[in-house]
Image (cartoon, rainbow, N blue to C red):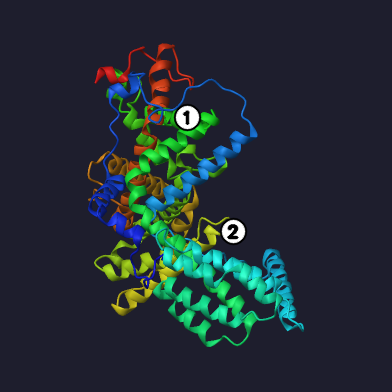
Amino acid sequence: MPLNDERPTSTSTVASEEQSSDTESSGRCDSLTSSSDVDFSRQSFTSDSSSKHNSPSCSPPKPVTLDEVMASARDLSNLSLAHEIVVNRNFHIEPPDLPQNSLHKMVKDMVHKAFWDSLESELNDDPPEYDHAIKLLEEIRDILLSFLNPGANRLRTQIMEVLDMDLIRQQAANNVVDIQGLESYIINTMGKFCAPVRDDEIKKLKENSSDVVKLFKEIFRVLDLMKMDMVNFTIQSLRPELQRQSVEYERAKFQSILERTPNALDHTTEWIRSSIEEATRVMPPTQKSSKPLPGPTLVLDTAYISLLTWDENKGPLPETIITDESRLQEMQRSLQLYQKVASVLLIVYSSIGGAVSGLPALVERLKKMTAVLLEGMHRADFNLNEALSNVSAQICSEVSKSLAERNLPALSTELQATLKGQICDITQENNPIRTLVEGRVKIYFRVVLSSTNSHRTPPPVPPGLGLIQQELMGLGVSFVNLVNFNKKVYGPFYASILKNLLFINTQEPTLQNGITQGSASSPLESK
């Protein structure tokens, strides 16, 4: 975008400065999102030595001032923006699109109309008044200058000379200012700066230069688009550098938030504490006899898996997950849909397996149809019982049609009623099919997190989930990438929390959560 005297292409000075390190950045970027599980060594849990940005601050509680709260809010905003740029390759800024009948849009339209009407009235006076027009020209000049590189001295001098506000005011006082000529120069200059995608907009500006006020409006509209292009180009140019430094940057930003807000890890601590309880319950009896508490890796894997079924009504997400909240919600919704589809198809196979056996095209059609009818099931106003009833009716219709085409007996009324009842019953929490599917999904994600290469080659799904294998494997890759990056950034904070919960508290007869301890020794020491 911002060039000197050249026509812009897909590169710029900023991009060329980064070109020499493209190979290195791409490799490091891949390592950020696809690295294997963080290895929590014994030293990280037993050593007290750490740098400022590599472990959470342990300063005593103190009153938090409003300035500190605002500073933490700014840090969180910067942290969220940087994280989004790094992990979301499609991230870009779009112009605000206000709802058509919103109060904000109506007020904005009224204010703009009043301004443009006032400008038109001034220019139509005899003699014309140029106060508003000069302010617009000055604003346009500043925008054009903002597009320039620091070394574009010739163009900068030219713009300052042509749009010399002092000279224009003198010309306006003598009624000799050439507004249309200045607009023509501005449009030509915009053509030098704009991206190729805006060529048609510049062409339209040149074709509609008779109405001065309308042309001013259109110039500002196109300048807004160019500013948006500039922002998105800058984001694209900065992404490789952010990817190289993202872990350190995000950790440092969170550390600064923690220093100003000592309770910024309260929800994270509670999340890990409850995961210790859950991990203790799922530990094999043979392991419980040798060590009373689960290891840190098992605890963290259990914690991350719990995020896939996180209930917002039970409390907010851990502070260390906030930057991935939208991605996590999307994964949750997708997983809910996949589990319901798998449950429905398992019921179909168990009830009328002979009617669909050996017909992959029919099964795929039933799968897609079920997914479409259950789309949006996460919404509060979604009637799941009604949707499942429609799903069962459509399945009976499709299967009956397939049987008729093969000259086979149709499904009996009793069988159809049984099938519909079983499908609608999966809304019950204790439904055996639902429990089976959800349990095996948890097992699969536990395997995904424990595998060293699952970010590139996800493991096969457990029996019973083959009908959603592709969807589940894709979700597994996205999830493990999110987890690995999160561990890289917040691993030292988790290590400090786990150290307190698994080691320091083991010196007491029981943990705070009431887990009975058989020994005060560290679980890692038995490894």
Instruction: Please name whichever residue, 430 or 329, is drawn nearer the observer in this view of the structure.
Output: 329
Q: How many marks?
A: 2
Q: Is residue 418 left or right of residue 121?
A: left
**Picture coordinates of residue 461 (x, y %)?**
27, 50
SS label for mark 1: helix
Instruction: Please name whichever residue, 166 or 266, is drawn nearer the observer in this view of the structure.
Output: 166
Q: Toward which corner of the image does residue 490 lie, by quadrant?
A: top left
Q: Which residue is mark 1?
A: 269
Question: 306 above or below 262?
Answer: below
Q: Which residue is mark 2?
A: 381
The amino acid type of the residue labelled 2 equals Asp
How far apart in space, not on screen, are marks 1 and 2 (Cα)? Answer: 33 Å
SS label for mark 2: loop
**Picture coordinates of residue 478 (x, y %)?**
34, 51
Per the rendering, the mark at residue 385 is none
Is residue 265 in view? Answer: no
Q: In the picture, which quadrant includes the C terminus?
A: top left
Is residue 434 in view? Answer: yes
